[in-house]
Amino acid sequence: MSNIDRRQFIMVAGRSIPITIGVPYLVACSTDAEPMTGPSDPDNDPTNDPNNSNSVVTAVSTVDAGHSHNASIPESDVASTQGKSYGASSASGHVHTVTFTAADFETLRTTGQVTILSSSDAGHTHSFTFNT
């Protein structure tokens, strides 16, 4: 192992400071939309299939705790007569679950809009309003 002098150490350490400071910020504050996945069976979720051309119904949540989340469901699920759960996008280091009941899908079909309250995570919830 070779020794490095003080100047070399400062040069190497100085290059890592932007990475050390920037990475936690980017990870904690991501606002990129991520497709929702059914938490119980993500492999069976059509939004995870890049070859699936089905359209989706997307909602942006209310802002709580200084951030919001995005959520999308396959448009084909609007016709569902059974309840289903989906995961919202990650923001501030956590994810909420959005659960539709059969009645919620019926409301979305008949009125074109439904508001769903997410699960609680990190001490708060969000409301998602889906429109068809």
Image (cartoon, rainbow, N blue to C red):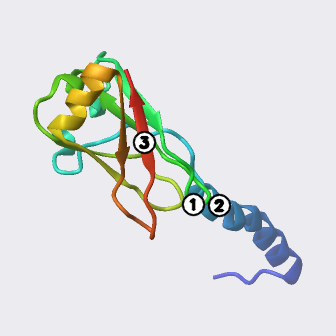
Q: Is residue 22 left or right of residue 48?
A: right
The N terminus lies in quadrant: bottom right
- Residue at mark 2: 25
**Residue located farthest toward the top when viewing the structure as drawn:** 53
> For the residue marked with disc 3, what is the amino acid?
Phe
The C terminus lies in quadrant: top left
> For the residue marked with disc 2, what is the amino acid?
Tyr
- Toward which corner of the image does residue 32 lie, by quadrant? top right
How far across and how far down the image is residue 50, in percent? 32, 25
Q: Is residue 31 left or right of residue 15?
A: left
Question: Can you see residue 67?
Answer: yes
Check whether the beta carbons of the residues at disc 1 and disc 2 lie within 8 A of each other. yes
How far across and how far down the image is residue 74, in percent? 28, 27
Give residue 128's mark: 3
Q: Residue at x 18, y 22 (%)?
A: 79
Tell me if residue 26 comes above or below residue 106 in the rendering. below
Q: Residue at x 57, y 62 (%)?
A: 65
Q: Is residue 67 left or right of residue 35?
A: right
Q: Is residue 28 left or right of residue 55?
A: right
Tell me if residue 117 comes above or below residue 120 in the rendering. above
Q: Secondary structure at mark 3?
A: strand
Tell me if mark 3 has few (under 14), some (14-19) or many (20+) residues whose alpha carbon lies within 10 angstroms of its own: many
- Residue at mark 1: 28
